[in-house]
Image (cartoon, rainbow, N blue to C red):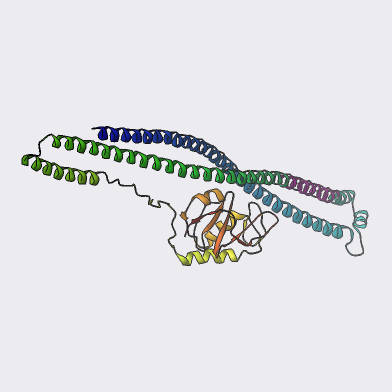
């Protein structure tokens, strides 16, 4: 009897200490979860801020393209005005030569030798009207030329300011990306810590339940042993003990089988919408060949003229147009349309916030980098995403 009480006391102490350890482990998981939730909140805030910056970058790109198109138009108008001024000047020189230098007689001689006053006045008025016309035309074209030149200068100044703002937003985007990546890594680490704490708590709870079952089983066996000792060792009692032992063994086996824990599968299916399937490779080749054909073309904001001037999205749009594919004008819609691909192939679009290029394989792309540069081959940099329209 004393031995049984001692064993019961020892078992109670063990279970009490185990229960205390289990309770102590719970706050750790709670603390990790709170820290993880706080970090996730910061990630959500950073993500929202980054989205706003990317939206501004896309808006600025559209404004820069529009401004570039206005500058291109002003440049063409200025060239046309200068050509017209040149033509007007040449025509005026011919008229002067015709009026004042025809043969050996001058216009003045023709006027003084005219047969009547009316003819003399008519000749003089004609010369004066031609002179006035030439002066008026010359003044108008000079004025037009000056207006166009002033407009072009104003547009170029606005373009520079937009470029500066875009660079500031791009720098802000880069900084936000770095901060966001670090914070996401922190969240991932806290997720792992939290999962480890939850698994540890689950194991402790399972161990506690196992020990409770074992304790209950020991107590039951002790009760049955004590009961059998008072049974005077009768044959029927021996039979009952044998039956009880059989029942106990069966019960233990069932208990062990019933308590086999099934762990959730850690395999996660990749539901990424991106695809690496191949499209029409002949169309892709046409896109790449068109890009190669524009190597050396100057970068021009709003430029859509192959061989003369292209911006980044103007280049990608042109290359797809050559292949018979219509895509949006600016990099934002280009980077969100088409088909997302995780394994890029030549002919896909390399996408960045506010910038695009044509992937040509081997980790390289052809793109129009920035004002003052030309279309060229460059290694894919940073962390782009890829879109396919072929």
The total of numbered circles placed on residues is 0
Q: Quadrant of residue 202?
A: top left
Is residue 129 left or right of 300 when viewed as pictured? right
As displayed, is residue 277 above or below residue 4? below
Return the x and y of residue 335 as percentages of the image width and height. Answer: 52, 51
Determine the residue positioned at 66% across, 61% down. 297
In reply to whether residue 225 is colored magenta, the answer given is: no
Is residue 194 left or right of 57 when viewed as pictured? left
Magenta stretch, overall SS? helix
For the N terminus, the image quarter is top left
In reply to whether residue 133 is colored magenta, the answer given is: yes
Looking at this view, is 283 or 23 the one in front? 23
For the question of whether residue 330 can be seen, the reply is: no
Is residue 216 left or right of 23 when viewed as pictured? left
Determine the residue positioned at 50% across, 49% down. 336
Determine the residue positioned at 35% across, 49% down. 265
As displayed, is residue 317 above or below residue 70? below
Return the x and y of residue 8 as percentages of the image width and height. Answer: 28, 33
Q: Which residues are magenta?
A: 128-155
Determine the residue positioned at 69% across, 45% down. 164
Is residue 277 left or right of 62 when viewed as pictured? left
Looking at this view, is 238 or 207 the one in front? 238
Return the x and y of residue 314 as percentages of the image width and height. Answer: 59, 55
């Amino acid at each position: 009897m004393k031995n049984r009480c001692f064993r019961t006391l020892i078992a109670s102490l063990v279970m009490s200490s185990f229960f205390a350890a289990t309770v102590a482990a719970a706050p750790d998981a709670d603390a990790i979860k709170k820290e993880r939730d706080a970090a996730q909140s910061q990630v959500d805030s950073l993500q929202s801020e980054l989205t706003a910056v990317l939206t501004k970058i896309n808006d600025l790109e559209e404004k820069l393209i529009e401004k570039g198109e206005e500058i291109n138009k002003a440049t063409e108008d200025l060239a046309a005005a200068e050509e017209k001024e040149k033509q007007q000047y040449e025509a005026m020189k011919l008229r002067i030569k015709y009026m004042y230098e025809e043969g050996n007689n001058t216009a003045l001689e023709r006027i003084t030798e005219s047969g009547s006053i009316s003819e003399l006045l008519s000749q003089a008025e004609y010369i004066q009207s031609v002179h006035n016309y030439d002066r008026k035309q010359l003044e108008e074209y000079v004025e037009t030329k000056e207006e166009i030149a002033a407009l072009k200068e104003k547009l170029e100044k606005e373009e520079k300011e937009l470029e500066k703002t875009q660079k500031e937003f791009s720098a802000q985007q880069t900084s936000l990306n770095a901060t966001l990546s670090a914070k996401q890594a922190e969240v991932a680490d806290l997720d792992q810590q939290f999962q480890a704490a939850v698994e540890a708590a689950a194991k402790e709870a399972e161990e506690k339940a196992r020990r409770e079952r074992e304790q209950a089983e020991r107590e039951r066996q002790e009760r049955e042993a004590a009961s059998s000792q008072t049974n005077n060792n009768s044959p029927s009692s021996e039979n009952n003990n044998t039956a009880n032992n059989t029942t106990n063994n069966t019960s233990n086996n069932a208990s062990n089988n019933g308590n086999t824990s099934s762990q959730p599968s850690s395999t996660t299916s990749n539901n990424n919408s991106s695809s690496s399937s191949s499209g029409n490779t002949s169309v892709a080749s046409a896109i790449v060949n068109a890009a190669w054909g524009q190597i050396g073309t100057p970068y021009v904001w709003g430029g859509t003229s192959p061989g003369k001037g292209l911006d980044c999205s103007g280049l990608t749009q042109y290359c797809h147009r050559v292949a018979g594919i219509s895509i949006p004008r600016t990099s934002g819609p280009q980077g969100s349309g088409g088909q997302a691909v995780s394994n890029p192939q030549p002919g896909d679009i390399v996408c960045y916030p506010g910038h695009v290029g044509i992937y040509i394989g081997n980790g390289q792309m052809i793109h129009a980098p920035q004002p003052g540069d030309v279309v060229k081959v460059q290694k894919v940099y940073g962390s782009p995403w890829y879109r396919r329209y072929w």
